[in-house]
Amino acid sequence: MSTIRLLAIASLAFVGAATLSTTGCSNTSAAAVKPEKDRKVAPDFTLKDANGNLVKLSDYRGKVVLLNFWATWCGPCKIEIPWFIDFQQQYRDRDFAILGVSFDDDGWKSVKPYIEQKKINYRVMIGTEELSTLYGGIDSLPTTFLIDRTGRVAKMHMGLVGKDEYQSEIQDLLNGKQPAKAGSLLSPGRFAFIRAE
Protein backbone atom coordinates (compact mmCIF):
# COMPACT_ATOMS: atom_id res chain seq x y z
CA MET A 1 0.00 0.00 0.00
CA SER A 2 1.24 3.52 -0.77
CA THR A 3 1.80 5.96 2.07
CA ILE A 4 -1.53 7.53 2.89
CA ARG A 5 -3.09 9.83 5.40
CA LEU A 6 -5.46 8.00 7.75
CA LEU A 7 -8.53 9.73 9.11
CA ALA A 8 -10.45 8.28 12.04
CA ILE A 9 -14.15 8.75 11.34
CA ALA A 10 -16.84 8.54 14.03
CA SER A 11 -20.24 8.47 12.40
CA LEU A 12 -22.88 10.40 14.34
CA ALA A 13 -26.56 10.53 13.39
CA PHE A 14 -26.73 14.25 12.67
CA VAL A 15 -23.35 14.60 10.91
CA GLY A 16 -23.05 11.22 9.22
CA ALA A 17 -23.85 12.36 5.70
CA ALA A 18 -21.55 15.38 5.93
CA THR A 19 -18.73 13.27 7.33
CA LEU A 20 -18.95 10.76 4.47
CA SER A 21 -19.01 13.43 1.78
CA THR A 22 -16.03 15.31 3.18
CA THR A 23 -13.89 12.19 3.33
CA GLY A 24 -14.60 11.29 -0.27
CA CYS A 25 -16.43 8.16 0.80
CA SER A 26 -19.86 9.04 -0.51
CA ASN A 27 -19.37 6.96 -3.67
CA THR A 28 -18.55 3.85 -1.65
CA SER A 29 -21.55 2.00 -0.30
CA ALA A 30 -22.06 -1.11 1.76
CA ALA A 31 -23.68 -3.76 -0.39
CA ALA A 32 -27.26 -4.34 0.63
CA VAL A 33 -28.10 -7.97 1.23
CA LYS A 34 -29.13 -9.39 -2.12
CA PRO A 35 -31.37 -12.29 -3.02
CA GLU A 36 -29.30 -15.34 -3.85
CA LYS A 37 -29.95 -14.98 -7.57
CA ASP A 38 -28.50 -11.45 -7.56
CA ARG A 39 -25.31 -12.15 -5.61
CA LYS A 40 -21.99 -11.73 -7.43
CA VAL A 41 -19.15 -14.21 -7.22
CA ALA A 42 -16.41 -12.99 -4.88
CA PRO A 43 -13.22 -12.28 -6.85
CA ASP A 44 -10.80 -15.16 -6.52
CA PHE A 45 -7.27 -14.63 -5.24
CA THR A 46 -4.24 -16.59 -4.13
CA LEU A 47 -1.99 -15.33 -1.33
CA LYS A 48 0.46 -16.88 1.12
CA ASP A 49 -0.51 -17.19 4.76
CA ALA A 50 1.75 -16.65 7.79
CA ASN A 51 3.18 -20.16 7.38
CA GLY A 52 4.01 -19.64 3.71
CA ASN A 53 1.16 -21.85 2.50
CA LEU A 54 -0.98 -20.78 -0.44
CA VAL A 55 -4.55 -19.70 0.26
CA LYS A 56 -6.95 -19.66 -2.67
CA LEU A 57 -10.43 -18.30 -2.01
CA SER A 58 -12.13 -20.60 -4.52
CA ASP A 59 -10.85 -23.61 -2.56
CA TYR A 60 -13.36 -22.62 0.13
CA ARG A 61 -16.41 -23.25 -2.05
CA GLY A 62 -18.93 -25.21 -0.01
CA LYS A 63 -18.08 -23.20 3.12
CA VAL A 64 -19.41 -19.93 4.46
CA VAL A 65 -16.46 -17.52 4.50
CA LEU A 66 -15.93 -14.34 6.47
CA LEU A 67 -13.30 -12.36 4.56
CA ASN A 68 -11.92 -9.55 6.70
CA PHE A 69 -9.65 -6.73 5.50
CA TRP A 70 -7.85 -5.21 8.48
CA ALA A 71 -4.58 -3.82 9.89
CA THR A 72 -2.79 -4.05 13.23
CA TRP A 73 -3.01 -0.27 13.77
CA CYS A 74 -6.78 -0.16 13.15
CA GLY A 75 -8.72 0.37 16.39
CA PRO A 76 -12.06 -1.06 15.20
CA CYS A 77 -10.19 -4.08 13.78
CA LYS A 78 -8.74 -4.77 17.23
CA ILE A 79 -12.27 -4.89 18.62
CA GLU A 80 -13.48 -7.35 15.97
CA ILE A 81 -10.59 -9.81 16.00
CA PRO A 82 -11.48 -11.48 19.34
CA TRP A 83 -15.01 -12.00 17.98
CA PHE A 84 -13.62 -13.63 14.86
CA ILE A 85 -11.43 -15.89 16.97
CA ASP A 86 -14.58 -16.95 18.84
CA PHE A 87 -16.51 -17.52 15.59
CA GLN A 88 -13.71 -19.64 14.14
CA GLN A 89 -13.77 -21.82 17.25
CA GLN A 90 -17.56 -21.95 17.51
CA TYR A 91 -18.32 -22.81 13.87
CA ARG A 92 -15.19 -24.72 12.84
CA ASP A 93 -17.16 -27.96 12.43
CA ARG A 94 -19.94 -26.34 10.37
CA ASP A 95 -18.17 -25.62 7.08
CA PHE A 96 -17.21 -22.10 8.13
CA ALA A 97 -13.90 -20.30 7.70
CA ILE A 98 -12.46 -16.89 8.41
CA LEU A 99 -9.77 -15.40 6.21
CA GLY A 100 -7.99 -12.27 7.39
CA VAL A 101 -6.16 -10.01 4.93
CA SER A 102 -3.90 -7.41 6.51
CA PHE A 103 -3.07 -4.12 4.82
CA ASP A 104 -0.20 -3.19 7.13
CA ASP A 105 2.42 -1.25 5.16
CA ASP A 106 5.29 -3.22 6.69
CA GLY A 107 3.64 -6.58 6.08
CA TRP A 108 4.67 -9.59 8.12
CA LYS A 109 7.01 -7.51 10.32
CA SER A 110 3.95 -6.23 12.20
CA VAL A 111 1.46 -8.96 11.40
CA LYS A 112 3.28 -12.13 12.50
CA PRO A 113 3.93 -10.88 16.06
CA TYR A 114 0.31 -9.70 16.24
CA ILE A 115 -1.00 -13.12 15.18
CA GLU A 116 1.07 -14.75 17.93
CA GLN A 117 0.18 -12.17 20.56
CA LYS A 118 -3.57 -12.35 19.93
CA LYS A 119 -3.53 -16.12 19.26
CA ILE A 120 -5.40 -15.68 15.99
CA ASN A 121 -6.74 -19.10 15.00
CA TYR A 122 -7.67 -18.41 11.38
CA ARG A 123 -5.56 -17.93 8.28
CA VAL A 124 -4.06 -14.48 7.73
CA MET A 125 -2.48 -13.11 4.56
CA ILE A 126 -0.96 -9.79 3.45
CA GLY A 127 -3.08 -7.83 1.01
CA THR A 128 -1.92 -6.25 -2.24
CA GLU A 129 -3.00 -3.31 -4.38
CA GLU A 130 -4.25 -5.83 -6.94
CA LEU A 131 -6.47 -7.52 -4.35
CA SER A 132 -7.80 -4.19 -3.15
CA THR A 133 -8.72 -3.30 -6.73
CA LEU A 134 -10.47 -6.64 -7.23
CA TYR A 135 -12.72 -5.82 -4.29
CA GLY A 136 -13.58 -2.34 -5.49
CA GLY A 137 -10.77 -0.52 -3.71
CA ILE A 138 -10.42 -1.05 0.04
CA ASP A 139 -10.65 2.53 1.31
CA SER A 140 -11.83 1.77 4.83
CA LEU A 141 -10.72 -0.66 7.50
CA PRO A 142 -12.19 -2.89 8.66
CA THR A 143 -14.07 -4.01 5.57
CA THR A 144 -15.65 -7.45 5.78
CA PHE A 145 -17.37 -9.66 3.22
CA LEU A 146 -19.62 -12.58 4.08
CA ILE A 147 -19.46 -15.14 1.29
CA ASP A 148 -22.00 -17.92 0.89
CA ARG A 149 -21.33 -21.57 0.15
CA THR A 150 -21.45 -20.97 -3.60
CA GLY A 151 -18.68 -18.36 -3.39
CA ARG A 152 -20.95 -15.34 -3.81
CA VAL A 153 -20.94 -12.18 -1.69
CA ALA A 154 -24.02 -12.16 0.55
CA LYS A 155 -23.12 -9.08 2.56
CA MET A 156 -20.45 -6.44 3.00
CA HIS A 157 -19.71 -4.36 6.08
CA MET A 158 -17.59 -1.24 6.07
CA GLY A 159 -16.56 -0.24 9.58
CA LEU A 160 -17.29 -1.78 12.94
CA VAL A 161 -20.58 -3.60 13.46
CA GLY A 162 -21.84 -5.56 16.43
CA LYS A 163 -20.78 -9.08 17.29
CA ASP A 164 -24.42 -10.16 17.50
CA GLU A 165 -25.05 -8.83 13.98
CA TYR A 166 -22.17 -10.87 12.58
CA GLN A 167 -23.27 -13.94 14.52
CA SER A 168 -26.82 -13.70 13.21
CA GLU A 169 -25.63 -13.33 9.62
CA ILE A 170 -23.21 -16.23 9.91
CA GLN A 171 -25.89 -18.49 11.35
CA ASP A 172 -28.36 -17.49 8.65
CA LEU A 173 -25.84 -18.32 5.92
CA LEU A 174 -24.89 -21.61 7.59
CA ASN A 175 -28.58 -22.49 7.78
CA GLY A 176 -29.22 -21.37 4.22
CA LYS A 177 -31.34 -18.38 5.23
CA GLN A 178 -31.33 -14.85 3.85
CA PRO A 179 -29.40 -12.50 6.21
CA ALA A 180 -31.19 -9.49 7.69
CA LYS A 181 -31.43 -6.26 5.70
CA ALA A 182 -28.22 -4.22 5.60
CA GLY A 183 -27.98 -0.89 7.37
CA SER A 184 -26.37 2.29 6.17
CA LEU A 185 -22.71 2.61 5.22
CA LEU A 186 -21.69 3.97 8.61
CA SER A 187 -24.72 3.99 10.87
CA PRO A 188 -24.61 5.81 14.24
CA GLY A 189 -21.98 4.32 16.49
CA ARG A 190 -20.02 2.61 13.70
CA PHE A 191 -16.36 3.41 13.29
CA ALA A 192 -13.90 2.95 10.48
CA PHE A 193 -10.53 4.20 9.38
CA ILE A 194 -10.97 5.93 6.05
CA ARG A 195 -8.11 6.15 3.60
CA ALA A 196 -7.63 9.59 2.07
CA GLU A 197 -5.13 10.94 -0.41
Image (spheres, rainbow, N blue to C red):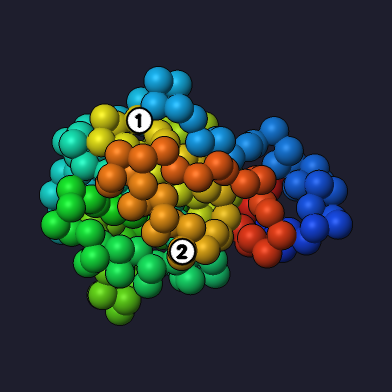
Q: Residue at x 57, y 43 (%)?
A: 182
> Label 1 to label 2, Cα distance in Å?
22 Å
Q: Secondary structure at mark 2?
A: helix
Residue 32 % position (x, y): 56, 36
Which of the 4 image quadrants contains residue 168?
bottom left
163 w.r.t. 39: above or below: below
Residue 40 placement, left or right of 54: right
Q: Is any atom of residue 132 visible in this view?
A: no
x 38%, y 68%: residue: 83
Looking at this view, name the residue that lies furthest to the bottom.
Answer: 117
Q: For the C terminus, which image quadrant? A: top right
1 and 2 marks in contact (CB < 8 Å) = no
- Residue at figure coordinates x 14%, y 57% from the top left: 93
Q: Which percent across, then down, holds residue 161?
A: 54, 59
121 on left or right of 108: left
Q: Which mark is residue 152?
A: 1
Q: Amino acid at mark 2?
A: Asp
